[in-house]
Image: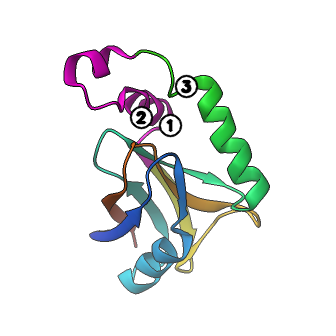
């Protein structure tokens, strides 16, 4: 059994920016030397999340519009009243999304569906440099 931890860094635009990191995760698994197991993708911080989606323009826009309906930017948030940074909505969105995702792999290949990509969603109200942690467990 091996446990390997790797980091990635990406630049985001904020404002519900969706970034496809599938190839970076696949490369991390391939380079790990572990043939079968699970990779956990985790994003530290409280204004971004990780999930899967069919990464195409229509689905991306549908996701962004759905998030806006669930946790709109233009309503009052107690976080904003306390801190004044205007990103209360991004904390709520990230909490609903979740900060991690586990993906199985075999023969050093991710077992994703044909139209399924791994994405980071940056909900913050400004561009960010984001660290992503990959923890690869297997044999």
- The disc at residue 97 is 1
Which residue is label 3 attached to?
72
Callout 2: 10 Å neighbours few (<14), some, many (20+)? many
Indicate yes or no whether the magenta region holds residue 7.
no
Secondary structure of residue under mark 3: loop
Secondary structure of residue under mark 1: helix
User: How far across and how far down the image is residue 10, in percent?
Assistant: 37, 68
The residue under the point 29% across, 20% down is 79
- The disc at residue 90 is 2
Report the Cα–Cα distance between label 1 and label 3. Answer: 14 Å
Report the Cα–Cα distance between label 2 and label 3. Answer: 9 Å
Tell which tag, 1 or 3, sits nearer the viewer. 3
Relative vertical location of residue 88 with respect to residue 112 in this rendering, above or below? above
Tell which tag, 1 or 2, sits nearer the viewer. 2
**Left or right for 71, reference 61:** left
Q: Nearer the viewer, residue 54 or 137?
A: 54
Dot 2 or dot 3: first in sequence order is 3
Q: State which quarter of the image contains the N terminus.
A: bottom left
Relative vertical location of residue 132 with respect to residue 27 in this rendering, above or below? above
Dot 1 or dot 3: first in sequence order is 3
Report the Cα–Cα distance between label 1 and label 2. Answer: 10 Å
User: How far across and how far down the image is residue 131, in percent?
Assistant: 29, 61
Relative vertical location of residue 6 with respect to residue 117 in this rendering, above or below? below
Callout 1: 10 Å neighbours few (<14), some, many (20+)? some
User: How far across and how far down the image is residue 60, in percent?
Assistant: 68, 52
**Left or right for 124, reference 79:** right
The residue under the point 36% across, 26% down is 88
Q: Nearer the viewer, residue 51 or 13?
A: 13
| Residues at circles 1 and 2 in contact by the CB criterion of under 8 Å | no
Q: Nearer the viewer, residue 128 or 56?
A: 128
- Write the start and end of the magenta stretch as one range: 77-100
């Amino acid at each position: 059994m091996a446990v390997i931890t790797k980091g990635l860094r990406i630049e985001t635009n904020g404002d519900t920016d969706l970034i496809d990191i599938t190839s970076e995760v696949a490369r991390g698994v391939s380079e790990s030397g572990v043939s079968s197991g699970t990779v956990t993708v985790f994003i530290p911080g409280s204004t971004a999340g990780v999930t899967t989606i069919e990464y195409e323009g229509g689905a991306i826009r549908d996701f962004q519009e759905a998030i806006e309906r669930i946790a709109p930017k233009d309503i009052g948030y107690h976080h904003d009243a306390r801190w004044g940074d205007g990103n209360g909505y991004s904390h709520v969105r990230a909490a609903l999304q979740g900060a991690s995702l586990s993906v199985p792999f075999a023969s050093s290949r991710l077992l994703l569906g044909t139209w399924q990509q791994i994405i980071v969603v940056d909900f913050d109200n400004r561009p960010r440099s984001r660290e992503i942690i990959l923890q690869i467990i297997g044999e």
